[in-house]
Image (tube, rainbow, N blue to C red):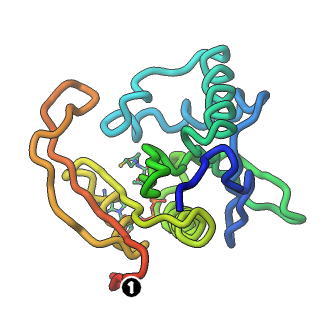
Amino acid sequence: MKVEPLLSDVPERLLTERLILRCARPGDGPALQASVDASLEGLRPWMPWAQAAQSPEESEAIVRRMAGQFALRQDLPFSMFERCAGDAEGLHVGGTGLHRIDWGVPRFEIGYWVRTGFEGQGLVTEAVRALSRLAFDRLRAARVEIRMDTNNAASRRVAERAGFTFEGILRRDTLTPDGQLRDTCIYSRVRGVEEPVS
Ligand SMILES: CC(C)(COP(=O)(O)OP(=O)(O)OC[C@H]1O[C@@H](n2cnc3c(N)ncnc32)[C@H](O)[C@@H]1OP(=O)(O)O)[C@@H](O)C(=O)NCCC(=O)NCCS
């Protein structure tokens, strides 16, 4: 059955054990800017958009663009916040989302980054599990994939821990942020197949 993306019911807020995942909205710029600023060194090798500090105007424009794309179902980015008492939002601790969407399949790619100081606690794995449930249970995904630089060991572990299967390597498929040729790993989960979790 063909899916009309604009009619697709996508929750704007997801709760996990320790996180609130929420679509961006106007006014989120300062929280994003502070989080990226605190994380630039860790993000720079992997994320082309995180090469230099953002101005307040750039950050606000980014969150407004995210909100617009979310509303149009062109992209489904979520900001990650600490989940505090009463389900209040704490610190902005990163970004994730369902990207490069093909609603016809439907197929999604999960992306992620975490704020410096919040790595190694399983937060991103928790977010990836929640987005996988959203994709398969509510958005009827046939396939969800995660791609990363072959050298990005932490990102590969996240995919493996979240139950994604390694499918292979696309050789010299893109460039690193500093312009070197890069090999890309592809991990996936597909509907109806239980993947072994490592
Ligand atoms: C990749 C990233 C999102 C992982 O976030 P995280 O919150 O630390 O992830 P988790 O805690 O859920 O899991 C991290 C796993 O990677 C492992 N890991 C962390 N750093 C590592 C490193 N440098 N080398 C190898 N493994 C590493 C951890 O030990 C853990 O695995 P384990 O449970 O087997 O011990 C984070 O490192 C990050 O933001 N990196 C910069 C942006 C980025 O690379 N995004 C992905 C682009 S594809």
Q: In this view, does 110 lie to the left or right of 15?
A: left
Q: Where is residue 65 in the image (x, y as percent from the top left)?
A: 63, 26
Q: Which residue is drawn at 68% across and 22% down?
A: 60
Q: Is residue 143 above or below residue 59?
A: below
Q: Which of 54 and 24 is in front in this view?
A: 24
Q: Is residue 78 left or right of residue 177?
A: right
State the image quarter where residue 176 is shown.
top left
State the image quarter where residue 100 is shown.
top left
Image quarter of the C terminus: bottom left
Whether residue 121 can be seen here: no
Q: Which residue is drawn at 77% across and 28% down?
A: 26
Q: Is residue 148 above or below residue 190?
A: above
- Residue at the limit of the structure toward the right, as seen here: 86
Q: How crowded is mark 1: few (under 14 residues within 10 Å), some or many (20 or more)?
A: few
State the image quarter where residue 157 is shown.
bottom left
Whether residue 103 can be seen here: yes
Residue matched to label 1: 194
Q: Is residue 134 above or below residue 23?
A: below
Q: Residue at x 70, y 27 (%)?
A: 29
Q: Where is residue 192 in the image (x, y as percent from the top left)?
A: 42, 81
Q: Residue at x 35, y 71 (%)?
A: 164
Provide the secondary structure element on which disc 1 rests: loop
